[in-house]
Amino acid sequence: MCEIPAYKNEELSFEERAKDLVSRMTLEEKVTQMIYNAPAIPRLGIPSYNWWNEALHGVARAGVATMFPQAIGMAATFDEDLVYKVADVISTEGRAKYHEFQRKGDHGIYKGLTFWSPNINIFRDPRWGRGHETYGEDPYLTGRLGVAFVKGIQGNDEKYLKAAACAKHYAVHSGPESERHSFNAIVSQKDLRETYLPAFKECVKEAKVEAVMGAYNRTNGEPCCGSETLLKKILREEWGFKGHVTSDCWAIRDFHLHHMVTKTAPESAALALNSGCDVNCGNMFPNLLIAYKEGLVSEEAIDKAVIRLFITRMKLGMFDNPEKVPYTSIPYEKNDCKEHREFALEVSKKSMVLLKNENNLLPLDRNKIKSIAVIGPNADSREALAGNYCGTASRYVTVLEGIHEAVADDTRVYYAQGCHLYKDKVEGLADPKDRFAEAVSAAERADVVVMCLGLDASIEGEEGDASNEYSSGDKKDLNLPGLQQELLEAVHKTGKPIILVILSGSALAVSWADENIPAIIQAWYPGAEGGKAVASLIFGEYSPSGRLPVTFYRTTEELPDFRDYSMKNRTYRYMQNEALYPFGYGLSYTKFEYGEIRLDKDRINVSEDIECSVKVKNIGQRESEETVQLYLKDVQARVEVPKWQLRGIKKIHLNPGEEKEVTFALTPRQMALIDNEGKCILEPGIFEIYIGGSQPDERSQRLTGTKVSKSTFEVIGDVVQLEY
């Protein structure tokens, strides 16, 4: 009886097994395993594997799967537990699909267990086309939801990964899309550590994310997929990252073609490998064989990368007895099952943000509405449900279909497209505004109008993915595109009450609507049955609890230069003007009252935590969830710091008259500031705590009609430097 090779010995550690397996490969075989579409090595029993898979808001690009709201919509829930459950469902379906594909011999792209999600870049500028893939503009919220998503994807087994998550795009990446292959993002050490890196650090250190993807751009002169600073010094040495790094797709060829930091393909491949990039989404890494002959890379460096890749595959159970791997028994029937689709609808409901509700126009009484007009280019649009990086749903419910389902049997529903999403006509041979008359006629005959405007992923998204008419996926401005604003004003002239439903993945400057339209809902890209969630909100089947994960600005003109990566005058933390709708804002169908904040002490040492609690009471007539937010302000900082910043989120459910106590703990790290050198410092001084359903700014409190509770405490002792 021959002894089994070490790499097949399930008693050994994955690292020992991967080292043994790699030691048996030729140099050429090793290099083939460093490409995203790694071929089989039959003599060693290694099947082919494609590393490229997507799972941003559901298993993507591999046929039917449950489609959740786009990431920015999930961010609007401000709910860590919910995002964890979403990711858990996604990885369940990913496993179900993977094992079925394996049984059919399908090892193709989008069929593996290495999901290149979540996107935890900071949505620093509302013009960025890919912002809807993120969790918004705030580092704390992004970090908490990113950690929850990674944990849900990767599972909680002590030995095996359910699937492998990937934190992307590392780092300092948020447009412009048209220049991403050559752009150099210049960022201060303060902004790097205070804004752009925290979510990545938390996903690495707290969630133990298995993979990190480098960005296309350069950061402070170094291409991100070949950055010694980012990949070696910070990611591996400082944070202790043990997983693998993948390049963004075809990013390594940008080194010599666009960034001009190398001259040849072998030099580019060598720079990426030597900096710590392990797998190449693209076709540059075969050049490592030339780089090796030219003395640019060592076989040891190649071994190190390939070992990391096989450790990941082994953690996923790909080389073990399926009966020992807890996730192999998930049946294909779990994919797109009724329970998952119903859950996705619940998530969609929780993502809706009610921005305006003048004179309590909403919710509508379905028994009193005899006719309703549903108007707009997004009213019957499946694209506006889906966002990008999505799978295929087995059932879609647009807003129009959702309203048809929701109204009473004898209620007449009029529908008019009104206008194209961004062109000046719907029919190619028609005159401009060819659907305006129909829209006005529909509105005139209705008791109430639902206008569905906004964007979709065909004009807001990734370079190459979205229409070039819209700046390679970025937005040139924050206005409603095409004829939408004119259509809104034309329908408004009928005098009928209008409910504006904005389907978009980013903030639009809807100042005219804020002044003239009585009810406004931000619905994001709400997922496959998102139209049902919108209709349920309009007819009061639930009370909205979503909050904005981004600032809605009044004008494009107040934004800094898109290419400027300084956080000065950006996002709620540093902006100087009053927002149209602030980060953290959203209305409810009920009212909440916040009591006084109670601190366990009002003076602490620099090494101590502080605990704070507040009672929240539902003083309205409807049961509802409330999104409790804690903001912290460093009053006496000696460097410029955010005016306040989010430091705690809690979701609670309250019936009318019910009261609950919510408790937060603040750590020294949460009180610390990042100085101008990028050091993490906790200074003695006075801090202010705010707890409420919004930010403590005047605009939020005016819009909600609810005061935010405030308390102060003092930190005493000497200045200390903390671990970043």
Image (cartoon, rainbow, N blue to C red):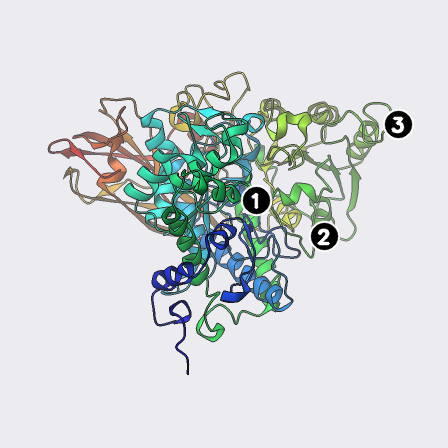
Q: Which amino acid type is shown beneath numbered disc 2?
A: Glu
- Residue lying farthest to the top in this orientation: 557
* Residue 319 percent coordinates (x, y): 47, 67
Which residue is denoted by mark 1 in the rendering?
Answer: 70
Q: Dot 2: few (<14), some (14–19), or many (≥20) neighbours within 10 Å?
A: some
Q: Residue at x 39, y 59 (%)?
A: 23
Question: Is the C-beta separation of discs 2 and 3 under 8 Å?
Answer: no
Q: Dot 3: few (<14), some (14–19), or many (≥20) neighbours within 10 Å?
A: few
Marks 3 and 1 sit apart, C-alpha to C-alpha, by 35 Å
Q: Earlier in the sequence, mark 2 or mark 3?
A: 2
**In front: 321, or 296?**
296
Q: Which amino acid type is shown beneath numbered disc 3?
A: Leu
Marks 2 and 3 sit apart, C-alpha to C-alpha, by 34 Å
- Let me know if residue 356 appears in the view: yes
Q: How many marks?
A: 3
- Residue lying farthest to the right in this orientation: 429
* Residue 156 percent coordinates (x, y): 39, 62
Q: Dot 1: few (<14), some (14–19), or many (≥20) neighbours within 10 Å?
A: many
* Residue 511 percent coordinates (x, y): 58, 23
Q: Earlier in the sequence, mark 3 or mark 1?
A: 1
Q: In terms of secondary structure, where does tag 3 sit?
A: loop
Instruction: Determine the image quadrant of residue 161.
Output: bottom left
**In front: 163, or 29?**
29
The quadrant the C terminus occupies is: top left
Which residue is denoted by mark 3 in the rendering?
Answer: 429
* Residue 373 percent coordinates (x, y): 75, 38
Q: In terms of secondary structure, where does tag 1 sit?
A: loop
Which residue is denoted by mark 2 in the rendering?
Answer: 405
The quadrant the N terminus occupies is: bottom left
**In front: 64, or 555?**
64
Instruction: Determine the image quadrant of residue 584.
Output: top left
Marks 1 and 2 sit apart, C-alpha to C-alpha, by 23 Å
